[in-house]
Structure formats: C-alpha cells, structure tokens
Amino acid sequence: MATRHMVDKERTLWNGRPQQEIDMTTTRFAPSPTGYIHVGNLRTALMNYLIARKAGGTFILRIDDTDPERSKQEYVDAIQQDLEWLGLTWDRVEKQSDRLERYEEAAQQLRDLGRFYECFETPVELDLKRKKQLNMGKPPVYDRSALALSEDDKARLREERGNGHWRFKLDHERIEWVDGVLGARSIDASSVSDPVLIRGDGQFLYTLASVWDDIDFGITHVVRGADHVTNTATQIQIIEALGGTVPTFAHHSLLTGPQGEALSKRLGTLALRDLREAGVEPMALLSLMARLGSSDPVELQSSLEEIASGFEIGHFGAAPTKFDAEDLYPLTAKVLHELPLADVAEDVAAAGVPDTLAERFWDVTRENITTRKDLKSWWELFANGAEPDIADEDKEFIAQAMLLLPEGPFDDATWGTWTKTVKEATGRKGRGLFMPLRKALTGQSHGPDMSSVMPLLQVIKARG
Ligand code: GLU
C-alpha cells in the first residue's frame, strides 16, 4: 500500500494532478452538429481522446445541439462516421438536447445564488452601447444596467418585449488557472461581459449547458482551441458558483495555412470526409495531427495506442500551427508501403485486378502509389496497355524489339530473356537498351522493376 502511494505521488499528469485523479480521467469532444468536422476539430478530438486513453480513462462524445435550428441529425451521423473512420472510439455519447431539464435546474441554482439576472436590451441597443464604449476608448463590456431594474420595471419590460435573456453575474476579480499549453493564465473578470446563458426565447446557450455537463460528467481535462480562452475564464466562475470541480484546461493553438494565412475560410475544404475521399489514410492523418505544433517530430506511427503512449500535451506550443494538407500524402504513401495484400485486397479487386494477379500486382504497385486511388490507373495501364513513348531515333529499334517479344502471357523470366535477345540482335546495351523498352511498354521513364511488371502486362500497344 505504502509503495503504491509513493509511486502514485511520483507519477503525475500535467498541471500536477495526482495519480488518483488520473485514474478517473474523463475528457470530452464536444462538436456542434452544424456541419462536417475538419482538421481543426480533429485536433481537439484527438487530444482529448489521447489524454483519456493514455490514462485509461473515459472519452465522451458530447453533441452540443442546444441550437435546434442549426443542429442536424445528418451531421451527428457524419461526425460519428468520421471519428469511426479514424478509430477514435468514444465510451459514451451525450446529447445536450436530452438534458434541457438539467439545465433548468442549473439556472434555478444560479438564480437562488443571486448570480443570474434578466436583461431586456435588444441586439440593436446592445450594439449601440458597444459602439459608444469603443468610441470613448473603453472596452465593450456590458454595463450591467439591467441590475438596476426593479421588479415592476421587469414586469413592464416583459409585457412590452417578451421574456428577457439571462446573464451570469461575474465576480469582478482576477480569474486564474494553469493552462496545459499556455501555462499560467490570469484574466480580469471586469474586462469581460457577464455571459448570456439563456436567450429571450428560453434557449439555453452553450456556456450554461457545457459547464453543467462538465460538472455532471466529472470532466477532469478540457482541451479545446485557443478561441475559447475567454470562455474558460467565465466558465471557471460558473463552475465554482455551481459547486463543481474546475477541470484542468488546455488551449491548443489554432491552425493556419502553410504560409501562416488564416485557415478559417479554407477549413470547409479540409473536412475529414474530403480527406478520406481524397485517399488519405487514417494513420497518416492521426500521426500528423498528434504531433503537429509540438516539439515531438512528426513520424508515422502504427497505432492509436502507440500515439497515446507518447502523447504529451505540455509539448505543444502556443504559437499558431501551420497545417499543409500536402504533408498527408507522403505519410499516406508510407502507410500503404507497409500493408500486406489482405489490407488492400478490396481495393485491388475494385481496381479490376483478377484474383490470380492480385499478389503480384500489389507487390509491384505498393511502392509506386500515393493513395489507394492510384491502384486503378496502374491496373488500367497493365490491362489496356500504356500509350508507348518512343523517341524518333528509337523507332526502328523498338520495331525490331517488338518482333522479338514472345506472345503473352509473360512470366518472371520474360524480361531477362527478351532483353538478352534484343541486345544480341541490336548490339544495344545498358540504359540505351532498357530505357526505350520500358518507355515503349509502360509509357513512363520510371516505375517498378520491369521483370515483375511483365507478367502483369495484358496488352502491348507498342506491338503496333
Ligand atoms: N461546441 C463547442 C465548440 O465546438 C465546444 C467547446 C468546448 O469544448 O467547450 O466550440
């Protein structure tokens, strides 16, 4: 017992959390189902997943669907498919739309605590206030004028304008936390507007739902994008007001394009399903995203377990992280080079390769493809014959060589015997012999070993 306690004390996760807490590590990925998830979302999902898996904890998929107009089941399904494609399995799913009664309880607690107040300004009025403050060189923080309303004022405003929206009353003190990526953070609460938690139409907003879920589900670590830093400050106060335990927060930097340009507009083209469609291999994408922006080198990993065991959130930097989708392709090619036929048999068959040639076809092409999609064009080349590439000065030589080429089907020995015969007949040798023959048969000046290619060739267009 004593020994275990000592070991426990020594082994700590980031932010000095003791082992007892690591044992119940619980993280969540909380997408809003209003679109397809992209590489930016994947970063968040993956980091939360890896922290939970590394600690043997729980990873929750939380569907943030408090906005009934924008949330769609189609996107919930798509998010799940995308995560499944990558093997990012969750231990349970929670949907915020199933928990509205719970949020009402949280709201009531905040009212009872005197930390919740109803406001009636219209969006136009709020905008005007903000503009005035900015003109006067002041930060556009909500001025709390609703706090001065009497019960009679509120009743009258409710008559005139309908129900008000509800704001959480921040304590005007510094909010501090040790961030897993950013280090010690401190935000002055008086520089932030009291957050609106319920809209005039009664809709619970993300902040209330998220905070209450994090408390209810025992979330120990929250990793999300740096665009949430201010949210974190206000959420810490709300969690404390509701008597919850503040999780450890970490904010990863946002992704930019390869030149440092904002990626927000292009993220639409970097949806996970587009990358899958383009032929990117899951392990290539996971290997890149688990290391990009950290001090650990990007290298192809073999499994999520391997990625998890080497994952350290503290190795990530705060600076924006450059992402270039092109980097996914060399990694994808590397994944494919390693695969046995069994793992690509379906794609090989779908490319049209007969079973009898599958093994040889895969041996020949595996090192010459970038994605599985390339298999089809290789088979087309073998099955239908390539357009020959013959230089003028080689025309006669090729014509002569073609007369010496035996009828198919070819075998492993064909290339050797044939080129030997051609050499004897024409006196050519070395590159001058082999290169024109390769180009005549495959239309390309480079590619797989010709002895292995010959048995795959079904048609030789250069025969004329
Ligand atoms: N639904 C929120 C988002 O996608 C979740 C943020 C959070 O992790 O709390 O931005």
Image (spheres, rainbow, N blue to C red):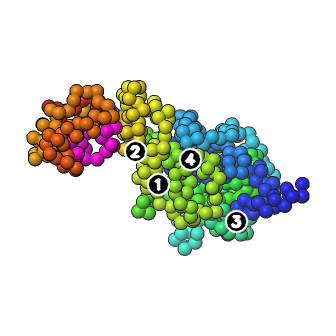
Residue 250: tell me if it is visible: yes
Q: Nearer the viewer, mark 3 or mark 1?
A: 3
Q: Image height check: is 84 above or below 329?
A: above
Dot placed on the residue nearer the N-terminal end, 3 or 2: 3
Quote the CA–CA distance across marks 3 and 2: 47 Å
Quote the CA–CA distance across marks 1 and 2: 35 Å
Point out residue 354 in the picture as x, y percentages from the top left corner. Answer: 38, 26
Q: Mark 4, residues whose alpha carbon is within 10 Å: few (<14), some, or many (≥20)?
A: few
Point out residue 294 in the picture as x, y percentages from the top left corner. Answer: 56, 62
Q: Mark 3, residues whose alpha carbon is within 10 Å: few (<14), some, or many (≥20)?
A: some
Point out residue 142 in the picture as x, y percentages from the top left corner. Answer: 63, 63
Q: Mark 2, residues whose alpha carbon is within 10 Å: few (<14), some, or many (≥20)?
A: some
Quote the CA–CA distance across marks 3 and 1: 28 Å
Judge whether residue 376 is colored magenta: no
Q: Secondary structure under badge 2?
A: helix
Q: Is residue 133 left or right of residue 207?
A: left
Q: Nearer the viewer, mark 4 or mark 2?
A: 2
* Quarter occupied by the N terminus: bottom right
Dot placed on the residue nearer the N-terminal end, 1 or 2: 1
Q: Are marks 1 and 2 in contact (CB under 8 Å)?
A: no
Residue drawn at point x = 52 percent, y = 57 percent: 298
Q: Amino acid at mark 3?
A: Val
User: Which disc number belongs to residue 367?
Assistant: 2
Give the magenta-colored segment's residue range: 434-452
Q: Secondary structure under badge 4?
A: loop
Q: Secondary structure under badge 1?
A: loop
| Residue pointed to by mark 3 | 178
Nearest to the observer: residue 290 or residue 71 = 290
Dot placed on the residue nearer the N-terminal end, 3 or 4: 3
User: Which disc number belongs to residue 302?
Assistant: 4
